Image: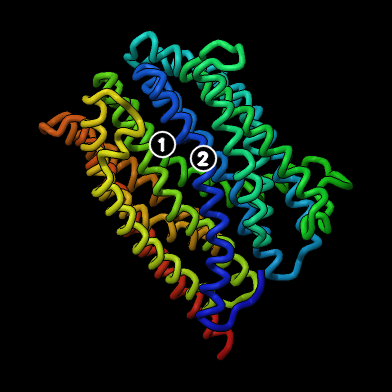
Amino acid sequence: MYQTKTKREKIKLFLIILIPILITQVSMYGMTLFDTIMSGRAGAADLAGVAIGSSIWVPVSMGIVGILMALSPIVAQMVGAKQDQDVPYTVQQGIWLSITIGVIVSILGFIFIDPILSFMDLEPRVQHVAKYYLISIGTGIIPMFVYNLIRCYIDALGQTRISMFIILLSLPLNIVFNYVFIFGKLGLPAFGGIGAGIASSLTYWIALGLSVWIVHVVRPFRKHHIFRSWSKPSFKSWISLLKIGVPIGFSIFFEVSIFSAVTLFMSVYSTYTIAAHQAAINFASLLYMIPLSIAMTLTIVIGFEIGAKRISDAKHYAYMGILSGMFISIFAGAILYIFDDPVARLYATNPEVIELTKHFLFYAIFFQFADGIGAPIQGVLRGYKDVNITFWMSLVSYWIIGLPSGWLLANYTNMEAYGYWLGLIIGLAAGAIALFTRMYYLQHSLQKKLDTQQS
């Protein structure tokens, strides 16, 4: 990370940080993408089972990862304020916290997995795949959380190419593991969709091992001696991380879980409808990795500028990122519109599933545009460490506006399953408008405060 003075320098630094993050996020989501595509090749029931399992796993895991993302703005502001001596202790406490959360989530999952799946009206094969997919992927939950914590530290230093390197090594292994465990190769039985969970767990362990090794031996990370002079767990430090992380985590959880809630509500429809819905959500979520990557980049650069008290520079980065998200969402919408049939055929061979998927993809065009604006603004606010109000905005937009409107449209109009997707569009659009209003107010307040101090 370094100070920029001109617009060209800002664009250059922004891209230097963004491109590796984007490649990393697309590759990480590639694991879920290949889980879904390859499970679909094993059968519609396997695809539906992975869909149900993912609808439970993804919001929980993403919410926890969101909590751990608090480390990025904290470390970025430390570096911006030239307080590097505080970085090792903060990262170590983050690792302790991620392990503790992983243990708690594993215990809760063991207790509640059967009641949750039994509550849904699923076909026996679908329920079986969903249950053991969750159990399999759960064996990698602790390494996943610790890896993401370490990745936040790496990215906060502006070394996003390192994260890219780790995931680019891990993704091909994930594909190979999927092939082996889903379809039964190398003398192993064919686990179907359950094999996707086994493959993901193994990949998380490998990613963790690579990240620990790199932080320990590679510059500039080794100067912090993260894995030397290990500090004891400190609940006081955990609370400091959680004060920023919990609102971030719940904001992400509310956004991600609304998609999962829709999947659970749609369990009353046919297996083909569930499979098509999951396929469309899966591909649309891949496109979402672009605005999400912009958001993560904005958190880093704005955190760095705010730490150095350069309010104007932080504002310039904010609008640069938001405009980028807008243009990219238009491009992504064009992809969904033009290539709906090839995309649908990636996930299934059944003609009915393909046709249903194409219909869902049409609605995805509109809600990903709202995401293209809303996600970067969330990244901006995290860079400012302004996370509490965004938490409430996410709750209201997604769960009080989006999901109920979707339920009403699905059950009281002839839209049926597609009504839920229109509800998603309404909720995401409301969230984007509210977030922009908050960002504008915050920037105005900070500038006014700075002007007062200088006068």
Tell me: residue 446, above or below residue 281.
below
Tell me if mark 2 has few (under 14), some (14-19) or many (20+) residues whose alpha carbon lies within 10 angstroms of its own.
many
Q: Is tag 1's residue or tag 2's residue first in the polypeptide sequence?
A: 2
Determine contact: label 1, label 2, CB under 8 Å: yes
**In the image, farthest residue toward the left:** 414
| Residue at screen point 34% across, 64% down | 327
Horizontal and vertical percent position of residue 96: 73, 39
Residue 229: x percent and y percent?
A: 89, 47
Q: x, y (%) of residue 368?
A: 32, 50
- Tell me which residue sits at (28%, 43%) in the image: 424
| Image disc number at residue 257 | 1
User: Residue 99 falls in which quadrant of the image?
Assistant: top right
Residue at image point 60% right, 45% down: 168
Please say if 441 is above or below 163: below
| Helix, strand or loop status at disc 2 | helix
For this view, does 147 lie left or right of residue 228? left
Write down the residue under mark 2.
63
Quadrant for the C terminus, please. Answer: bottom right
**Distance CA(mark 1)–CA(mark 2):** 9 Å
Q: Residue at x 41, y 19 (%)?
A: 42
Is 201 situated above or below 64? above
